[in-house]
Amino acid sequence: MTHHQEDKKITLSKEMLAEEMKKIDICMMTTVAANGHLHSRPMSNNRNVDWDGETWFFAYGDSSQVKEIEREPNVNLAYAVPDKIVFVSVTGRGEIVKDEEKKQELWYKDLERWFPKGPEDEHVTLIRVVANYAYYWSKEGEAELDL
């Protein structure tokens, strides 16, 4: 019989989670497709925003993630820094936000590679994911946080 080391529990705060997520450029967003299957894709994590339980993304209005969130708002965001052994899973509810001022406020230059016309592009919209639960794994241990 093998002996399994007990998983070490650490204390997680929103601030600690925000610090970790700031270091990660791309996360995987999973939405629920019309047929009930899970659908994941890489999304640019807006690292300039101080995370407070809400994560903002830019997307084209006709993209699968926008259509799927409009139909079924349950979303998972997965973050990873494998070389540092840091992994974060955030579950929450997505919503589509059509707000020109917010687009300008959240815009940063790196997004031009996906949205060459900038935040003024009428086809570009915002997705806000409001987190309700986060799980965190690292070398130090693991933790969960109800938000």
Image: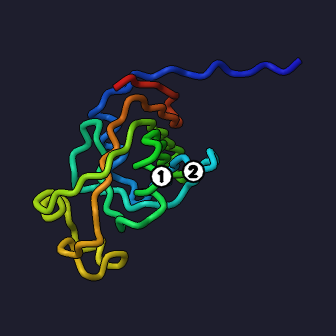
Q: CA distance from mark 2 to mark 1?
A: 7 Å
Residue at the right extreme, as displayed: 1
Q: Quadrant of the C terminus?
A: top left
The relative height of residue 93 versus residue 127 in the rendered view (above or below) is above
Which quarter shows the N terminus? top right
Q: Residues within 10 Å of mark 2 (few under 14, many from 20)?
A: few
Query: Image point 26% across, 42% down: which residue?
Result: 51
**Which of 131 and 4 lies nearest the eye of the viewer?**
131
Write the residue at 62% across / 44% down.
36
Where residue 123 appears, as percent x and y from the top left, is 29, 72
Left or right side of 33 for 114: left
> Badge 1 local density, few (<14 within 10 Å), some, or many (20+)?
some
Q: Are marks 2 and 1 in contact (CB under 8 Å)?
A: yes
Residue at the far bottom: name it. 116
Count of residue discs: 2
Checking the image for residue 34, the label placed there is 2
Q: Which residue carries the number 1 mark?
A: 68
Badge 1 element: helix
